[in-house]
Image (cartoon, helix red, strand yellow):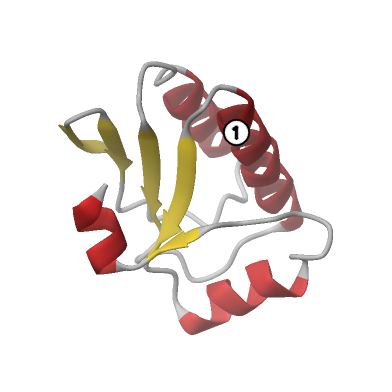
Amino acid sequence: MLRAIVCGVCFIGRTRFCFARTAEIAQLRAAVLARDWAEAIIIDLSEVRYVEMDAIQLLAFLGSWARENGIQLKLFNPSSYVHHQFKSVDAMFHFEFASLPDAMGL
C-alpha cells in the first residue's frame, strides 16, 4: 500500500478498495497513524470508484489528527464521482485535494 517516501512526504497509494470492508479501513488508519513523522501524507484515490460514509468519516478523523500533529493530509486524483462524494459532505468534513503539481511540490 505504501508507495513512496520523499523528503518527509508519505504517499499512500493506489488503493483499489471502496473502503467498504472493515479490515481495509483499519489498514488505511494504521498506515496513516504510523506516519506521525511525515510533513505530508498524500492518499492516492485514482483507483477508487466509490467511497462509503464510514470511510469518509475515517478520512475526516485522519485529517483532523494530521492537522493536530502539524501534518498535511491530502487526497490525490479521485474520480469525478468520488470527488463529488467528498464535496457533498464538505460542510461537515473538510478535505484537501492535491493536484499533481501540488503533490510534486510537497
Seen from the viewer's position, the closer of residues 11 and 18 is: 11
Height in image: 101 above or below 3?
Answer: below
Q: Image quadrant of residue 100? A: bottom left
Q: Secondary structure at mark 1?
A: helix
**Residue 30 in the figure: left or right of residue 13:** right
| Residue 37 shows up from this direction | yes
Height in image: 52 above or below 68?
Answer: below
Q: Image quadrant of residue 79? A: bottom left
Q: Residue at x 67, y 40 (%)?
A: 58
Q: Position of residue 104 (x, y in %)?
A: 19, 56
Q: Amino acid at mark 1?
A: Arg
| Residue 1 shows up from this direction | no
Q: Quadrant of the N terminus?
A: top left
Q: Which residue is mark 1?
A: 67
Q: Position of residue 86 (x, y in %)?
A: 65, 67
Height in image: 48 above or below 31?
Answer: below
Height in image: 99 above or below 64?
Answer: below
Q: Residue at x 25, y 28 (%)?
A: 8
**Residue 63 in the figure: left or right of residue 46:** right
Total label count? 1
